[in-house]
Amino acid sequence: MRTVRDFIKDGLMLTVTALILRTAGVYFSARLSIIAGEAVMGLYTQIMSVYAFAVTASSAGINLAATRIISECYGSKSYEKLDCALRSCIKYCLKAGLIVAALMFLTAPFTGSVLLRDARTVPSLRALAFALPFISVSNAFHGYFSGTRRIPPSAATSLFEQFIRISSTILALTIFKTSDVQTLCLVLVVCNASSEALSCFTLSAFYLHYRKKFPCGKYDISKIRKRFLGITVPIAVSALIRSALTTSEHILIPIGLKAYGLNSEKALAEYGIVSGMVLPILLYPMALLTSFASITIAELSARVSAGDSKSNIRLTVEKGITFAIIYGIGAAAVIGCFSDSLALAIYKNREAGEFIRLLAPLIFFMYLDHISDGMLKGLDKQNYVMKVNIIDAALSVLFAAVLIPRYGIYGFVASLYICEFFNCICSFGRIFLLVRPRLSILLTFFIPVASALIAVHFSSYVSNLSIYSTVSLILLATAVYILLLKITGVLNIFGKNQVSDAVKA
């Protein structure tokens, strides 16, 4: 098992990487909304929802399966199995990626013209098909590096991929000066597909370098393949169902907005604001949770495989849940308080600020659900997670069909709240029944809520006295929040001795 220093080092490295990627992503969305326009963002979001379904079909469960298998081999010091395990993963990835890519390319006219009801999406869908094999193989490589505790290659490649995507897109939009929505979307997806291919080649180069550090031996690959398929296939089937439902939801939203009375361009614009502008802001602070959730999957998997004590597993879960709660409360308060300033500073759009403020409380449930899902996967309960996600997606489709035609974009907001609350209750409830974490409601909820309210009100009061930038006020509110958590003893939960006991070698 890893030491505390290794655990924190890997977590911080992933966090820094994720924050850079999220910052770049928000910046990218802001530039696109200004350069391309809200209508392009809405159509692009629809195209990417279909693409997301194809990505799921070609790579669902691969990262988790590769991480689980590689971490088990690495944790048991069976280094000679590593190369065999990865080769088995890559063979599956190539087959799945090529098959789904061919299907996406051939069915693009039907998908674009009939399902999306917009023939302008067909060229973009065909262009994106070429990226699928590369994404599938990249997932296997990322799982390999996570399982062998080598975070830098994955982090560096992710940064490189985002840099290529953003720089090439902005350069292309500068060169191809046009207002044609179809051309703009095609430029966006070609740059996206190119960055995915370069990312795959970069990961393979890193792998060829690192594989020299482990001995290669002969091993019955059928055993690894059986284990790999045992994890991947159930997740892939479940993920396909969920992704199909999610894609249906994204198709129904603009249709529902039109039924509400909006014209085609206005419907795409409102959909683009919520999906392309607001949600990236809400998900931005999740970078920290995503980083630690990803290494927690490997850590809990290795602990369970090694037969670690239930008390150590429970302590690790307690810390993760507590951190997610106090972090989610703080993020919701800060983003909700500075919603208008963030919308104007990033997107120059006042309407986005209204929706950011409206959806800010949802952050708490999203973050708690996210960390709970990660821990459940680490405890080999990924099938339960997928079942809940399928039900959640089905409810989303139902609400999209019923609420949006009647209440417009606010019906979409209501469906987000209902479905996320359901998902959070199911995931957290399952973790609670499995591990029985001992949580203090006073320290993990009431004091953080009070501290967050005091912090944002103090920051708002300061902003009325002088002129400060939005970033400065957010940093001030964050600092006050952390200080109050320290004074009230909430941060003592993460005491050095306790953490050491939970993750010591």
Image: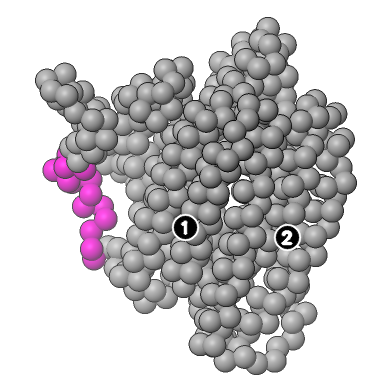
Which residue: 35% across, 28% down? 345
Q: Amino acid at mark 2?
A: Pro
Q: Quick one: label 1, few (<14), some, or many (20+) residues within 10 Å?
A: some
The residue that mark 2 highlights is 133
> Between residues 384 and 97, which one lies in front from this camera angle?
97
Any part of residue 352 in sight: yes
- The stretch of residues the image draws in magenta is 482-497
Helix, strand or loop under label 2: helix
Q: Quick one: label 2, few (<14), some, or many (20+) residues within 10 Å?
A: many
What separation in Å lies between label 2 and label 1 (alpha carbons)?
A: 20 Å
> Magenta segment: does it hold 363?
no
Residue 213 rendering spot, x and y as whole percentages:
51, 87
The C terminus sits in image quarter: bottom left
Any part of residue 63 in sight: no
Residue 453 rendering spot, x and y as whole percentages:
25, 27
Pointer 2 or 1: first along the chain: 2
The residue that mark 1 highlights is 159
Look at the picture and state if 356 lies above or below 409: below
Which residue: 57% across, 24% down? 38
Look at the picture and state if 372 lies above or below 363: below
In-image side of 485 versus 363 (left or right): left
Which residue: 19% across, 28% down? 468
Q: Main secondary structure of the magenta part?
A: helix
Look at the picture and state if 437 lies above or below 140: above
Q: Amino acid at mark 1?
A: Leu
In-image side of 97 versus 9 (left or right): right
